[in-house]
C-alpha cells in the first residue's frame, strides 16, 4: 500500500461480469488460453465465483487462476473451487505481524495464513508471491522459503519493480535475482535451475531436498522479448505492457454495440504491431528514478497497479 490516498475508478465504468466473459471469449478466439483474475483485490468484487463460473465454462481456457491478498480467501476458497477455478496465488511479503502491518496498513496476517490453509485444502496446493525490498523484508527470504516448503507451496520471489504506485522506488532497494540466489544457497546449498516446462515469468529452481521456488527478475533481467501477457482493467482498458502509459478502450467498443468480429479486429491489429519493451527500456536508463510521481497517479488512476493487475 504505497500511498495514503487513492483515486478510484468510477463505479459506472466498471465492466459487468457478462462483459468480462464476452471479452474473454473474444481473446480466446484469437488464441489466448490462460486467464488470471487479479487486482487490486478480486475477492472484494461481489459474487466473484459467478465470474469464475462463466469463464470456466469456456472449453478454450486451459488455465484459470486467481491472485489474491488472502484476507478473504477462507470465506471463498471452496466456492471458487466449485465454480471451476484451477489455481490460486497468494501475495505474502512477510511472516512478521509488525512488518505486515507496516506494509499493508492492516492487521490481517492471521487471516491471510488461514486463507492459505483453506486454499491448500480446496485446491491441493497454492503459490505464494513475495516482493522483496532491500532493507525492508530481505531478511525473510529464507523464512518465507522455509514456510512455503513446510506447507507444500511454491514461493516466487519478485524483484521490486518501479511501476504503478511504487513512488518510493529506488535502485538501492532492489534485491537482485543473483543476490537472492546467493542467500538461498548459503542456507540450503546449491540449487538446480529447472529448464522449460512452464509459461510463468519466473525462473524456477529446485533445492537439494526437491522443493521448488521461483524468482521473477523483471527489474535486473527483463524478459520483454518473450512476454506474451497483457492486462484488461476492471473498466475495460487493455494494456499490452505493465509499463504502458495508455491502453485500448475495449469498454467503449462493447457499449457502442460493436460486434465480436469488430472487437477481434481491433485486438488483433493492435497486438500485431506490439513493440512494447517497457522493462527493458527502464533497465537501460542511466538515471532511474520512480517512473510516476504521486501527483500524476492522483490525476490518472489507470497508472496505479491496483487498476491494471499488478
Image: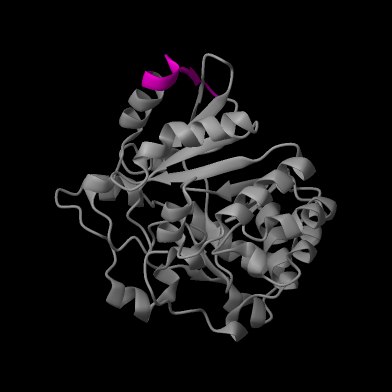
Instruction: Indicate the quadrant where residue 79 lies.
Output: bottom right
Give yes or no for residue 195 being in the magenta stretch. Answer: yes
Please, which residue is most extreme toward the front here? Answer: 98
In the displayed structure image, the side of residue 92 where residue 260 appears, left or right: right
Q: What is the x, y in percent for residue 217?
A: 38, 38
Q: Quadrant of the N terminus?
A: bottom left
Above or below — where is 17 with respect to 163?
Answer: below
Give yes or no for residue 96 being in the magenta stretch. Answer: no
| Residue name at image x 67 percent, y 70 percent | 45
| Residue name at image x 55 percent, y 38 percent | 200
Above or below — where is 104 with respect to 225?
Answer: below
Asked whether residue 63 is in view, the answer is no
| Residue name at image x 33 percent, y 44 percent | 219
Asked whether residue 245 is in view, the answer is yes
Q: Which stretch appears magenta?
A: 186-196
Above or below — where is 160 with respect to 197?
Answer: below
Q: What is the x, y in percent for residue 237?
A: 53, 70
Q: What is the x, y in percent for residue 31?
A: 66, 48
Amino acid at each position: 500500500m504505497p500511498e495514503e490516498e487513492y483515486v478510484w475508478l468510477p463505479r459506472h465504468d466498471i465492466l459487468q461480469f457478462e462483459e468480462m466473459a464476452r471479452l474473454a471469449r473474444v481473446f480466446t478466439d484469437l488464441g489466448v488460453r490462460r486467464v488470471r483474475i487479479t487486482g487490486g483485490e478480486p475477492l472484494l468484487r461481489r459474487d466473484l465465483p459467478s465470474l469464475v463460473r462463466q469463464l470456466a465454462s469456456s472449453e478454450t481456457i486451459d488455465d484459470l487462476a486467481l491472485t489474491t491478498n488472502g484476507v478473504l480467501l477462507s470465506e471463498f476458497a471452496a466456492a471458487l473451487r466449485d465454480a471451476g477455478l484451477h489455481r490460486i496465488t497468494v501475495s505474502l511479503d512477510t511472516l512478521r505481524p509488525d512488518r505486515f502491518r507496516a506494509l499493508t496498513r492492516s492487521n490481517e496476517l492471521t487471516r491471510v495464513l488461514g486463507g492459505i490453509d483453506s486454499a491448500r485444502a480446496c485446491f491441493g496446493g497454492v503459490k505464494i508471491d513475495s516482493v522483496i525490498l532491500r532493507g525492508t523484508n530481505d531478511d525473510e527470504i529464507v523464512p518465507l522459503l522455509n514456510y512455503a516448503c513446510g506447507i507444500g507451496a511454491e514461493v516466487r520471489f519478485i524483484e521490486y519493480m518501479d511501476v504503478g504506485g511504487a513512488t518510493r522506488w529506488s535502485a538501492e532497494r532492489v534485491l537482485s535475482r543473483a543476490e537472492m540466489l546467493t542467500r538461498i544457497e548459503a542456507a540450503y546449498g546449491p540449487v538446480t535451475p529447472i529448464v522449460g516446462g512452464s509459461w510463468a515469468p519466473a525462473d524456477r529452481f529446485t533445492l537439494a531436498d526437491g522443493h521448488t521456488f521461483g524468482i521473477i527478475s523483471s527489474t535486473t533481467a527483463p524478459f520483454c522479448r518473450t512476454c506474451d501477457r497483457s492486462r484488461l482493467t476492471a473498466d475495460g482498458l487493455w494494456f499490452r505492457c505493465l509499463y504502458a502509459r495508455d491502453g485500448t478502450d475495449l469498454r467503449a467498443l462493447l457499449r457502442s454495440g460493436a460486434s465480436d468480429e469488430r472487437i477481434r479486429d481491433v485486438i488483433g491489429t493492435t497486438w500485431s504491431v506490439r513493440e512494447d519493451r517497457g522493462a527493458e527500456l527502464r533497465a537501460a536508463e542511466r538515471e532511474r528514478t520512480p517512473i510516476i510521481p504521486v501527483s500524476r497517479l492522483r490525476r490518472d488512476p489507470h497508472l496505479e497497479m491496483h487498476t491494471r493487475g499488478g
